[in-house]
Image: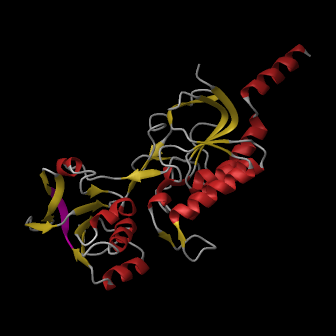
Amino acid sequence: MADTRHTKVLIIGSGPAGYTAGVYASRAMLEPLLVQGIEPGGQLTTTTEVENWPGDTEVQGPDLMVRMEAHAKAMGCEIIGDIINDLDLSERPFTAKGDSGTTYTCDAVILATGARAKWLGLPSEEKYKGFGVSACATCDGFFYRGQEIVVIGGGNTAVEEALFLTNFASKVTLIHRRDELRAEKILIDRLMKNEKIEPLWFHTLEEVVGEDNPTGVTAVRAKHVKTGEITEIPCKGVFVAIGHAPANELVKDVLDTHMGGYVVTKPDSTETSIPGVFAAGDLTDHKYRQAVTSAGMGCMAALESERFLAEHGSPETSEVAQKETAEA
């Protein structure tokens, strides 16, 4: 028989927002359960050097998330390796169903499911995913030692991926639809000074070219956005780094969203359109999308859930109190 577990606060997601919420909810004696999801630790587990986390001049992303998980555990947060695949927010207590078969009920929920890499949607991109096409340089970069690689994009993610891949590749071509990058200036400066990286401006990826036996990438075809001219670039790996989309599958038809699917929260708050449901991190943040701001929102969500529970309690407690009042 499947287990059912109840908690005052259920935290869904395990990036900086989720783990920080776990620390603060535990300190508030809410005895939270945190369900890690499909990618424990979130996006920072697929990066390398993190240079903008306060207190660390440089820290490896996976190491930082191990430390944050340990901190949450030390405070008393119970961390569960499960994936929530269904969430019912129609009434309190809220109900979440895990891939393990466990049902979780809670008086308040903190959503910290983060974001996932975007794809271009090309048939050839889909065909060669895992066979030369990737969205994670730290996961797959070492496969291309001494090879030529292409990176698609123009923001922080693309520049960071390109710089990281120079550790392995003989050459990295960065394809961008404009003639200037949207990344932080310090990253752009590093990229432009790196002799292994060659930007290709005013181009988009038209097609990934490869072979089928064995399956693998051999080149890409890039299209000039103004002239339509096609340029074929030999390469063995293609890394798509065009940003991320919020992982909103559990709530996209229930909570208010905007800006391409990000969950709407009240001004200066993590409260969503349903009382008792809070959202933190990249699920709701379409503007900053930084680890430190995600952690800050995780703190806010835990404090706001504590305040909410102090005012509203659990549904069972409220029903008992109402019954006692009526009998008196």
Which image quadrant is residue 71 in? bottom right
> Relative to the observer, which residue lies in front, 285 or 125?
125
Residue 283 horizontal/vertical position (percent):
49, 49
Q: Is residue 46 above or below residue 58?
A: above
Q: Is residue 20 above or below residue 97?
A: below
> Relative to the observer, which residue lies in front, 295 or 271?
295
Residue 300 in view = no
Q: Is residue 220 above or below residue 167?
A: above
In magenta stretch: residue 7: no
Quadrant of the image containing the N terminus: top right
**What's the coloring here?**
secondary structure
Q: Going by the image, does 153 lie left or right of 327?
A: left
Residue 50 horizontal/vertical position (percent):
51, 70
Residue 307 horizontal/vertical position (percent):
75, 45
Quadrant of the image containing the C terminus: top right
Q: Main secondary structure of the magenta part?
A: strand
Q: Going by the image, does 37 lie left or right of 120?
A: right
What's the magenta region?
201-208
Q: Going by the image, does 34 lie left or right of 214?
A: right
Residue drawn at point x = 36 percent, y = 78 percent? 188
Number of marks in picture: 0
